[in-house]
C-alpha cells in the first residue's frame, strides 16, 4: 500500500505538471479526479504518511478548478498590457464541492441526511463547466464581482462582470446586502464565434469553452469580454440580509429568478434517494443537447440550516455533493482516411468522420496512429467509431461499433492474433483500411522501420520529407530565416531549385529567374529573402546543427554540443564515446549523430554549405568578455566573446512580461548562451524564477514560494551581482 501511495503521489504530480505548467493534459479531469479520490482514501487510512506537500494539501490540485491560473500564464504572454488583477478576500469562502463517482455513494449520502433529518428535501442541479463567481449587492446595487481564486481570496472582476449576460446591475428589491454565487460560462455558440474571430485575427484558438470563459472574464479590456459573450447562472445564495432567501434553496432561487431576473441553474427537487438518482440520470441524458457544457450534477440539501450538519472538510461546502459523469463519448461515421508524410517520412493516417460535438467543440478528425491500430480496431471507411477526447482536448477513437458492440484496441489484439497468418484476406473480409504500399506524395515504397509498427516512405528524396526538412531548417529554432514561408519552400522544391539544404545558399544565382517566375513574389520580396538567407550564413553554428534535424538534436542539445566541440568539423569526427561524454547526450543520440555524419550524402551537403560560406565554427576566443562586472548587463553586448559559461548548472524558469527583451526567446537565448538552462516549470532544481511581478498569483510564483526558490526580476537577473554571485558559488 505504501508503494501504491508513493506511486500515486508521483503520478498525480506528473499530471498536475502536465496540466498546469505544460498545458498538455494527458488524462481527462474525470480520470484525474479518480486518482485524487484514491489518494484521499489511502490518506484517510494512513494519515501518518501524508506530507505537507501531498497533492491533497495543495490548493487547486484536488480539483482542477483553477483554469484561471493557467489562463493567466497564457494571457501574460499574449497580452503585454496585462497586469495582475486586484485580490479580494471573500466575505463568505467560495469552497469546492466534494466529488463522488458512483450511484452508491450518492444513495448513501442521501440516506445519511434522511436519517438525521427525515423531512430533508434535495435539489439536483446541472454542474455547469465554467468558473465560479460571486456577486455582492449592497442596497440593491452590484458593488463587487469576484472569482473563486483559492476559495478564500479571489480576483476583482467587477468591470467585466457588468457585461456578462445574466448579471443584473441593480436589483428591484433593495436588499441591504446580498451575495450570490454562480457559474460564469460560455455557450457553444459564443465559443465557436469567439474562436472564429480569434482565427480570423491570427490569434490563439481556445481549447474549450471553460478555458475561453476563464480568459475572457479576467481580460483587462471589458469590450473584449462583451464581444465574446459570457453568461452567468446563480446556483447559491451565499449571504442575505433578508432571511427568506436563507431558508429553502429552491425557493430562494425561484424568487431571485422571478423577481430579479437572475438566470438560475436548472434544478430538480427530490425527496428520496431514488428520485435523486433519477434526476441525475435525467440531467445526464440531456447533457449532449444543452447549449453549454456540464460535467456533473450537484446534489444539495434544500434547507440551508441542515447543511452544517454534514460538513465535508475545510475545503468543501457542507451539505453538497457533486456526481461526476464519465467523459463524453460519441459515435461518428468514417467518411475518409487521409495520409500525410512527416519530416522523417513517417506516414500518418488520419480518420475523417461526420462532425460531432464533444466537450464543447465540433470535431471531425482523429489520428489512426499506424496499421496495427487500424487492424486492432477494425477501422475502415463507412464504419462507425466511438470518439472521446483525451484530456478533454484531443479527439481519439476508442473503438468501432457494430450492432451496438464496441471493438476496442484490447479486444482487437486477440482478434488480430487469430488471423495473423492471413491478414490481407482478413482485412478485405472486414473492410479494414490498408495503408498503401506506395508513398502518397512521391509513390516511393513504404516500409516498416525495423521492429517498429510505423510505416515510412523509403525514398530519401521524397519531396514531403524535403518540404518539412527545409521548413524546419529555416524555422526560428534553427537558422531563423525570416520570411521564408512554407509556401515559398514548396514552390521552390516543386520547381527544382531546392533539392537539399545546401541549395538554399545557391538560390541567389537564379535571382532573375525566380523574379520572372514570381516564386518568391516580385523583385523586392525576392531580394529581401535572398538577403535574409545570406545573413543567416553567419549564424552561430548550433543553429545549423539544429537545422540538420538529426534525431533528438533540438536547439538545447545543439547548443550544448557546439559549446563542447566548438566546430561542426570537430563534432562530425567525434566518436560515439566522445559524444556521450557531453552532458545530456545519451547513447541513442550519440549514435544518431555519428551515423548522420558518416553518411556520404550528408558529408557532401555539408561541404556544399561550407563552400557557400555558411559558418561552421563558434565565434570568439575563450575567457574574455561576456559577463558584466558592474551595472546592468546589456543583452547582445559581449555575447560574442565566449563567456566561460557562468550560468552552467543553473536552471531558470521565465514567466510573465519582459521589459528588456523583445520576447521570451531572446532571454532564453541569453541564458543558454551562458551555459544555463531554461525549464518550463518550477521544481526543486530551479535556480530562480524570473518574473517581474513578484506579487503575481500565477501557479509558477506560488510553486516557487512553496519550494523557497527565489523569484527575481529581469533587472535582478541581468545585474552583474547576480552573475558574479553565481560565478562565486559554482
Ligand atoms: Zn515519399
Image (cartoon, helix red, strand yellow):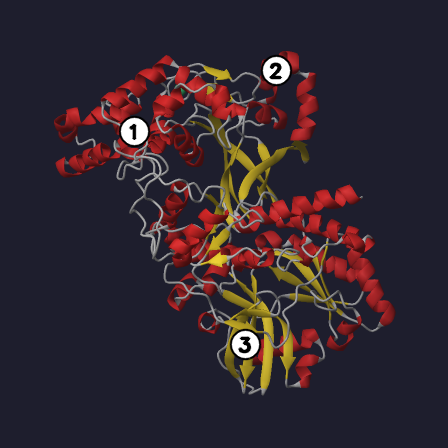
Q: Is residue 498 visible?
A: no
Where does the image place residue 710, in percent across and percent down from the top left? 52, 57
Residue 490 — which label? 1
Disc 3 target residue: 261
Camera-nearest label, 3 or 1: 1
- Residue labelled with disc 2: 423
Q: Determine the residue positioned at 82% across, 53% down.
A: 45
Task: Please tell me whether mark 2 or mark 1 is closer to you in this view.
Answer: 1
Of callouts 3 and 1, the N-terminal one = 3
Residue 261 in view here: yes
Among numbered discs 2 and 1, the one appearing first in the sequence? 2
Residue 321 screen position, x and y as percent: 72, 62
Label 1 packing within 10 angstroms: few (<14), some (14-19), many (20+): many
Q: Position of residue 434 (x, y in %)?
A: 53, 20
Tell me what residue is drawn at x 21 percent, y 36 percent: 529
As helix, strand or loop, the secondary structure at mark 3 comes to: loop
- Residue at the right extreme? 115
Query: Which element is circle 2 on?
Result: helix
Quarter of the rendered structure image containing ligand 1: top left
Judged left or right of residue 313, residue 86 is left
Query: Disc 3 and disc 1: Cα gap in Å?
Result: 58 Å
Closer to the chain start, of discs 3 and 2, is: 3
Amino acid at each position: 500500500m505504501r508503494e501504491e501511495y508513493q506511486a500515486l503521489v508521483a503520478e498525480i504530480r506528473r499530471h498536475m505538471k502536465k496540466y498546469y505548467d505544460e498545458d498538455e493534459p494527458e488524462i481527462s479531469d474525470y480520470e484525474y479526479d479518480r486518482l485524487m479520490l484514491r489518494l484521499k482514501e489511502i490518506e484517510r487510512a494512513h494519515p501518518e504518511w501524508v506530507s505537507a506537500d501531498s497533492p491533497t494539501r495543495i490548493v487547486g490540485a484536488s480539483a482542477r478548478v483553477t483554469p484561471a491560473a493557467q489562463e493567466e500564464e497564457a494571457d501574460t504572454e499574449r497580452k503585454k498590457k496585462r497586469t495582475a488583477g486586484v485580490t479580494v478576500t471573500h466575505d463568505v469562502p467560495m469552497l469546492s464541492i466534494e466529488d463522488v463517482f458512483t450511484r452508491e455513494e450518492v444513495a448513501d449520502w442521501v440516506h445519511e441526511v434522511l436519517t438525521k433529518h427525515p423531512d430533508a428535501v434535495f435539489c439536483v442541479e446541472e454542474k455547469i463547466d465554467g468558473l465560479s463567481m460571486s456577486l455582492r449587492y449592497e442596497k440593491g446595487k452590484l458593488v463587487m464581482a469576484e472569482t473563486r481564486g483559492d476559495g478564500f481570496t479571489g480576483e476583482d472582476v467587477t468591470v467585466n462582470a457588468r457585461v456578462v449576460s445574466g448579471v443584473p446591475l441593480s436589483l428591484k428589491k433593495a436588499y441591504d446586502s446580498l451575495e450570490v454565487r454562480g457559474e460564469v460560462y460560455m455557450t457553444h455558440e459564443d465559443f465557436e464565434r469567439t474562436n472564429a474571430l480569434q482565427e480570423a485575427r491570427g490569434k490563439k484558438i481556445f481549447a474549450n469553452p471553460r478555458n475561453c470563459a476563464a480568459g475572457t472574464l479576467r481580460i483587462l479590456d471589458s469590450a473584449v469580454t462583451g464581444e465574446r459573450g459570457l453568461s452567468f447562472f446563480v446556483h447559491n445564495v451565499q449571504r442575505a440580509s433578508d432571511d427568506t432567501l436563507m431558508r429553502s434553496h429552491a425557493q430562494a432561487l425561484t424568487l431571485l429568478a422571478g423577481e430579479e431576473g437572475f438566470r438560475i441553474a436548472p434544478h430538480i427537487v427530490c425527496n428520496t434517494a431514488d428520485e435523486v438518482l433519477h434526476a441525475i440520470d435525467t440531467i445526464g441524458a440531456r447533457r449532449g443537447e444543452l447549449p453549454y457544457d456540464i460535467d456533473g450534477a450537484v446534489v444539495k440539501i434544500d434547507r440551508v440550516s441542515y447543511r452544517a450538519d454534514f460538513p465535508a472538510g475545510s475545503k468543501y461546502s457542507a451539505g453538497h455533493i457533486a456526481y461526476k459523469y464519465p467523459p463524453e463519448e460519441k459515435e461518428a461515421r468514417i467518411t475518409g482516411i487521409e495520409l500525410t508524410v512527416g519530416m522523417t517520412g513517417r506516414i500518418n493516417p488520419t480518420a475523417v468522420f461526420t462532425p460531432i460535438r464533444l466537450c464543447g467543440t465540433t470535431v471531425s478528425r482523429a489520428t489512426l496512429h499506424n496499421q496495427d491500430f487500424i487492424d486492432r480496431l477494425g477501422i475502415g471507411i463507412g464504419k462507425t467509431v466511438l470518439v472521446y477526447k483525451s484530456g478533454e482536448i484531443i479527439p481519439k477513437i476508442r473503438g468501432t461499433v457494430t450492432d451496438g458492440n464496441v471493438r476496442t484496441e484490447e479486444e482487437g489484439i486477440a482478434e488480430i492474433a487469430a488471423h495473423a497468418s492471413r491478414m490481407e484476406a482478413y482485412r478485405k473480409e472486414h473492410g479494414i483500411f490498408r495503408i498503401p504500399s506506395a508513398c502518397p506524395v512521391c509513390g516511393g515504397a513504404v516500409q516498416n522501420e525495423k521492429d517498429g509498427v510505423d510505416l515510412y516512405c523509403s525514398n530519401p528524396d521524397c519531396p514531403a520529407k524535403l518540404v518539412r526538412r527545409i521548413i524546419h531548417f529555416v524555422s526560428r529554432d534553427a537558422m531563423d530565416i525570416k520570411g521564408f514561408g512554407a509556401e515559398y519552400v514548396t514552390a521552390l522544391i516543386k520547381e527544382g531549385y531546392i533539392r537539399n539544404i545546401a541549395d538554399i545558399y545557391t538560390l541567389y544565382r537564379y535571382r532573375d529567374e525566380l523574379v520572372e517566375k514570381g516564386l518568391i513574389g516580385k523583385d523586392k520580396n525576392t531580394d529581401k529573402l535572398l538577403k535574409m538567407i545570406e545573413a543567416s550564413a553567419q549564424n552561430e553554428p548550433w543553429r545549423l546543427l539544429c537545422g540538420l534535424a538529426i534525431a533528438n538534436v533540438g536547439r538545447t542539445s545543439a547548443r550544448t554540443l557546439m559549446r563542447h566541440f566548438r566546430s561542426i568539423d570537430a563534432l562530425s569526427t567525434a566518436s560515439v564515446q566522445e559524444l556521450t561524454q557531453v552532458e545530456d547526450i545519451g547513447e541513442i543520440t550519440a549514435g544518431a549523430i555519428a551515423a548522420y555524419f558518416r553518411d556520404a550524402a550528408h558529408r557532401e551537403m555539408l561541404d556544399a554549405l561550407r563552400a557557400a560560406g555558411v559558418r561552421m565554427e563558434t565565434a570568439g576566443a575563450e575567457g574574455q568578455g561576456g559577463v558584466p562586472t558592474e551595472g546592468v548587463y546589456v543583452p547582445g553586448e559581449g555575447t560574442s566573446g565566449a563567456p566561460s559559461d557562468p550560468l552552467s548548472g543553473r536552471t531558470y524558469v521565465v514567466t510573465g512580461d519582459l521589459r528588456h527583451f523583445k520576447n521570451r526567446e531572446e532571454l532564453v537565448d541569453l541564458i543558454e548562451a551562458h551555459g544555463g538552462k531554461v525549464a518550463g516549470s518550477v521544481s526543486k532544481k530551479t535556480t530562480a524564477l524570473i518574473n517581474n511581478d513578484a506579487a503575481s498569483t500565477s501557479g509558477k510564483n506560488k510553486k516557487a514560494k512553496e519550494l523557497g526558490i527565489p523569484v527575481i526580476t529581469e533587472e535582478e537577473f541581468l545585474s552583474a551581482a547576480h552573475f558574479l554571485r553565481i560565478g562565486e558559488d559554482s
